[in-house]
Amino acid sequence: MQEKMTDYILELKNVSFSFHTYGGVVKAVRDVSFSVRPGEILGIVGESGCGKSVTAQCILKLNPPKAGFFEGGSILYKGEDIVPKTNQEMRQIRGDEIGFVFQDPMTSLNPTMKVGKQIGEIIKKRKNITKQELRHQVIDVLEKVGITDPQRRLNQYPHELSGGMKQRVMIAMALIGNPKVIIADEPTTSLDVTIESQILKLFQKLSREFHISVILITHDLGVIAKLCDRVLVMYGGKILERASAEELFYKTAHPYTRGLLDSIATLETDKNAELRPIDGTPPDLFSPPIGCPFAARCEFGMNVCHKKMPDEVELSQEHKVCCWLQDKRAPRVEELFQKEWSNE
Amino acid sequence: MKKYILKRIIMSVITVLILITVVFFLVRLMPGGPFTNPKLTPEVKAVMEAYYGLDKPLPVQYVQYLKNLLHGDLGYSMSYSNQTVTSLILKAFPYSADVGIRALVFAFSVGIVLGIIAALNRGKKLDFLCIIIAIIGTSVPDFIMGGILQYFFGIRWGLLPIAQYKGIEYTILPMISLGFATLASVSRIMRSSMLEVVNQDYIKTARAKGISEFQVITRHEIRNAIMPLVTIMGPLVASILTGTFVIESIFAIPGMGKYYVDSISSLDYTMVLGMTVFYGVLLVIATTITDIVYGLVDPRIRVS
């Protein structure tokens, strides 16, 4: 059997996902499209509540089943749409095809089950696996994620492990089924910096050595710079800018991305200088704005921004942005400046 | 672990000692005494009191009682002539324990299952049904429950024997009436605990593994949800095992409940104390076992 060859292992096309709540319907993800290439690390960055976690959980349909629902779009995994799949069919994909690493390893491991057993569960669901083979595989995967003394560790309970170790166990769990894609939802948020860099290196290693695509969700641009090949910037349930990591940092095109970059303190920042936060609050997703979701907070906000969502403008092959400032019809800011300079 | 167990044993002994002391003096504070029958002449009464050592000063009696206790001697009953307290307890306890264990198993197994069903069907008809059962269980007293069961199963439908304790079919009605209230609270605790566990992060992790919904529930949810039940198990075990006066008298079971109540109303000092010691030791053992079981269920407690 020959698999259909596609350039992308995972493709989201115009996905919209909402939740029923007591207050009404929250439109958490609105018309999001992106694709993941085999073996790449794709970063999704954005502030809390921008829809990045919901997007990630959509892919495995892990959002609360009754409250959350797809409003439209399709998610193609190896060219096959998984949105209409039943829970039963999703089980083939979860763990085996797409692994998931959750945000908080402290609460994401079952406290009453030995870690070896928790990891082994994923491959145990496949038939014809002997106990020894299972144990062997668990030890193997624990070694892969850099846990020393795996023979001992697999018989321990989560509370006997450190935070970094727990996150490694989570990664081992995502890895053991030999998935093609690992989705990591803020995998280092609850870890301290030294452990964070170790875990990030581990993701890098996994993607390089085993050719696994990693979708890395974070709100930390530092993490993105260190690790990602390509980046999506999400805001108010929409993707505002997508670019290779390099272009995002050096050719920032969206005012929101600019704002995110400006609000980071670096070692070079003068200690008396004030940090520049982005004023205002994220949009209300019960009734999201019809225009650009960032318009209300944008220092370049124009009339048109509030009235109509801009189309995606291609700046280069990898770099696309949703902003009226970059629209073909908009006057080039650089041109204006150049005119002024030439006048002087 | 050894140190922990040793500490537990010492604590238990002290607990029981305090219990004995308090009960010993409290019983003596009650007006009257074991030999207040007006037919007894003062001479006979004096002889009786001397026989049981009641003529001596209270502290002396107390020390004497503790000495006997160290030898495992609970003394003679004051109202059942020529019977030791130990022999009375040994005669009655098996019945109480038998009904009690059955009631406990019934209450916990059915209660846990009902709790799980209710939690999984939250807000639906089945959940509502479980709530109704729980309300009946907590609000209907056991003696009324016993009477109703006897009427329907024993008299109306003639399915089960009404009273006495002579075989397995005799145990069913007492088991249900004794266990029903416990069943109700167990099912409620289990339900709320399940609902709490369902929202935990590790349940989402389990789902992301692609294991079946059944395995998510059995391996990840139930085990974690059962924890709060272990806590209430200890005291429940002791109180149910030592029998209940009402259920035992309704169903004519020769258990400990009757002796307990009788001994207090007749101020049978040795019997009251003996029963108390027995109950206290049982309670201490039950809570210790609970702690050990807790460790088995929750590995986090084992270490500390």
Image (spheres, coloured by chain):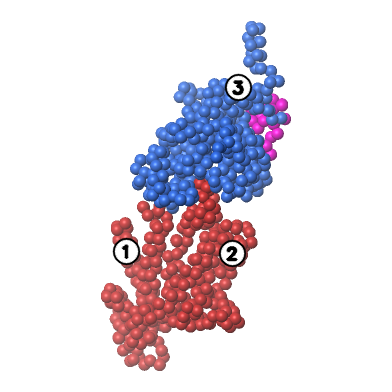
Q: Is residue B41 left or right of residue A97?
A: left
Residue nearest the observer in this picture, A330 or A96: A96
Display colour for chain B:
red
- Magenta span: predominant SS is loop
* Gap between marks 3 and 2 measured at Cα: 62 Å
Which one is in front in this view, the residue at disc 1 or the one at disc 2?
2
Check the image and report above or below for B235 versus A201.
Answer: below
Evaluate if marks 1 and 2 touch, with contact meaning CB atoms under 8 Å apart: no
Task: Report the residue at 49% width, 35% height from top.
Answer: A212
Is residue A298 covered in magenta? yes
Is residue B226 covered in magenta? no
Q: Which residue is mark 2?
A: B130
Amino acid found under the numbered disc labelled 2: Cys
**Which chain gets the blue colouring?**
A
Instruction: Provide the secondary structure element on which disc 2 rests.
Output: helix
Dot 2, crowdedness within 10 Å: few (<14), some or many (≥20)?
many
Q: Which residue is mark 1?
A: B9
Q: Can the viewer see residue A215 in this picture?
A: yes
Residue nearest the observer in this picture, B14 or A62: A62
Same-chain check, marks 1 and 2: yes
